[in-house]
Amino acid sequence: MSFDGEKLFSLLPALYRLRDAQLAQTTTQPALGPLQSLLAVIAQQIAAVEDDLDQLYDDQFIETCAPWVIPYIGDLIGYQPVNGVASAVASPRAAVADTISFRRRKGTVLVLEQFARDVTGWGAHAVEFFKRLADTQYMNHIRPHNYYAPDLRRWQPPEYMDTAFDATAHKVDVRRIAVERGRYNIQNIGIFLWSLTAYSQTLTPAAPVANNPLCFRFSSLGRDIPLFNNPVTQGADITAPAEPKNVPDRLRRHVLCKDIDDYDKSVAANKTATTVYYGAGNSLILYTQAQANGPLAPVLAGAIQICDLSGPDGHWANMPPATSIYTAAIDPLLGRIALPPPAAGSSSPAVVASYYYGFSGDMGGGEYARASSFTGTATQTVIHVPGDQPTVQAALNALPGDGVVEITDSGLHVEPLGVQVNVKANGHIELRARDGAHPTLILNGEMTVTGGQDAVFNLNGLLITSNGSPAGPSSALVHVPANVSINNRNLLSHLVITHCTLVPGWALMPQGAPQHAGQPTLVVEAAGTQTAVQKSILGGVQVQAFATASISDSIVDGNGLTGVAYAALDGSSGGGALTLQGCTVIGKVHATLLSLVSNCILWAGQDAWKAPLWADRRQEGCVRFSYLPEGSIAPRQYECVAEGPGTPEPLFESLRYGDPGYCKLFSNTDDRVRRGADDGGEMGGFHFLLSPQRETDLRVRMLEYLPVGLEYGIFYQT
């Protein structure tokens, strides 16, 4: 029963209440009587005791307990604290609550799969390897689909051989799974992880192949790329093991073909075609466009042929004939599209596609959330492209030297004369992609940036490439010249590049090689300009000695170990003071000063230069928790790994931009590199993903839930 001051006072005899009211009237100001005031204080203390009693009951449940009680409940159930990198375990309350739920299903393979997914934030699948053994089966638990030899008439067995979804029987492997050598044994559990993410690309024109109007590539850069599956969620609680459609993996030809066949059967059964999506989880949709800026005609799944379009030496094979009943042929492993020859007197249509590609993290632009990195203010003019203006240059010309130009789609934006940006004194211009868009800006020239005193220019969310040729050795995709005009210096104060890609080598060949290897992508000639790069991918960078550059969580690719990743304007002298934090740098670096190098991998080879990493001033600056090439001339070092005999090397999946595993470290990279950062994470550009910490969290959880006598191994599928 709850009591307040008025209720307690009303329980007193009338005599006391009347006397208290008389005492209250003797005061100069209206007030409660002394007895009523005392009871009000007593009521407050009673309410505090009541609240405490109610909270004592609530503290018995993780959903309602006070924050300070959470560690005690966790300790009671044996909860082991983890780093909490993934969002599913970022909240201690949610993590402990999930642990209580998991305890009820402890030891089951679905629990192992669920916390592998939740703890790492990646696609996951748990496999009991004893079910994959070619042995005599126990008659009380017969597995009728576990044949000793695979049925080679079906496409599934060879397609998934040696993957997480391998259903073929294997002989026993007595090597230990704990060191990731053996797999198929009675006591072994395999945890398979897909550490790449499937990123969407929406309504982007496919790149036509030169001299062949019937051939296209999904990539806006005109190179072969594998398409990825958009994973279908398994829900908050996993009730069935993961299937190929539930993980972000490469789209396989047979799988996509089966999806299209299943779609055709559903259309035939329902007598309707209300959807045009196909691929597991709506991973792919294709449109044709008869004329420029015309309407898009969706291609139904039944009009798609899946085939192998690869030919020798990068050529195309299995092209659809003029008599083909299909509208288009697709090769998902190469990201290629082929159309049949058009009818006489008509031209081939353009192709627009929505699809998914694979990459390690939110770097270099994409249709992921970036709004928190926008710098434009609410009072600035915002001009949309397309919409308000047809081109980026027209939108910049419409700004009064200050404002925002926002590209609103993921299409191709061609600027035949390059782009000229002029920021007024004390002005700020931001050229950005809308949040959720990933446009490609194609330059036939340079993006030239100039400004007045204290001017600032921001780039955000763009993929910038070129369809022209460099005018000289110092030509770049983004260029900050020394002068605005004759006798008029460029006074640009800050250049900020966030979530952008300045394509290394300017553009790519069909097989992924750079078209102009070694050509810088960013040149800063103006003295005093401060350049800041965050979560971006760049080619070579040239910065004059009296400017500065700060690069974080990014990749700088000089197109080879002996390419120039950073230097002055001549490509060999020391560039301006450089700060690198959480970066992967491919190629040689020469700076006047290395202000700070932290958690980085500098991967370079020796040639005619004095050293592959070279700082002119070694009395200042610091290099810490980083991997350095052999023979580096650098300031004082702390907890670094220097290349040389007997030292580990970073093992990259790929050093070619555009590959899904670009600059991603293999999981078997030595821990002195993979866990050598200051927080125990990996060195390099993907340090911010905290991949080793995710794996550590998983191993902690495995010790809690693994049945006695079993062993586990972690296997990365991407």
Image (cartoon, grey):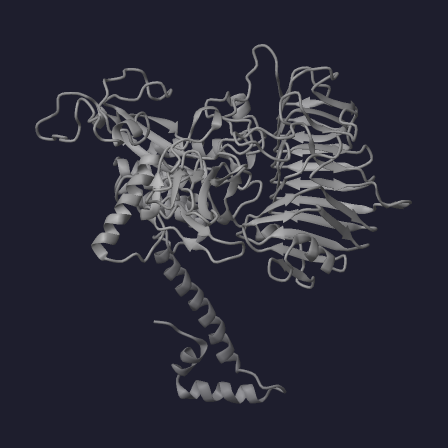
Q: Is residue 95 above or below residue 540?
A: below
The residue located at (77%, 55%) in the rendering is 427
With 485 as the anchor, is 310 left or right in this view? Answer: left
With 315 as the anchor, is 453 left or right in this view? Answer: right
Where does the image place residue 349, in percent across and percent down from the top left?
47, 49
Q: Nearer the viewer, residue 241 or 327?
A: 327
Where does the image place residue 332, in percent across and percent down from the top left?
40, 37
Q: Is residue 138 visible?
A: yes
With 404 as the anchor, is 667 left or right in this view? Answer: left
Where does the image place residue 384, in percent across and percent down from the top left?
62, 59
Q: Nearer the viewer, residue 482 or 330?
A: 330
> Dividing the picture into quarters, in which one does residue 563 lie?
top right
Q: Is residue 114 visible?
A: no
Quarter the N terminus occupies: bottom left
Quarter the C terminus occupies: top left
Determine the residue located farthest toward the top in the rendered image. 645
The residue located at (63%, 47%) in the rendering is 414
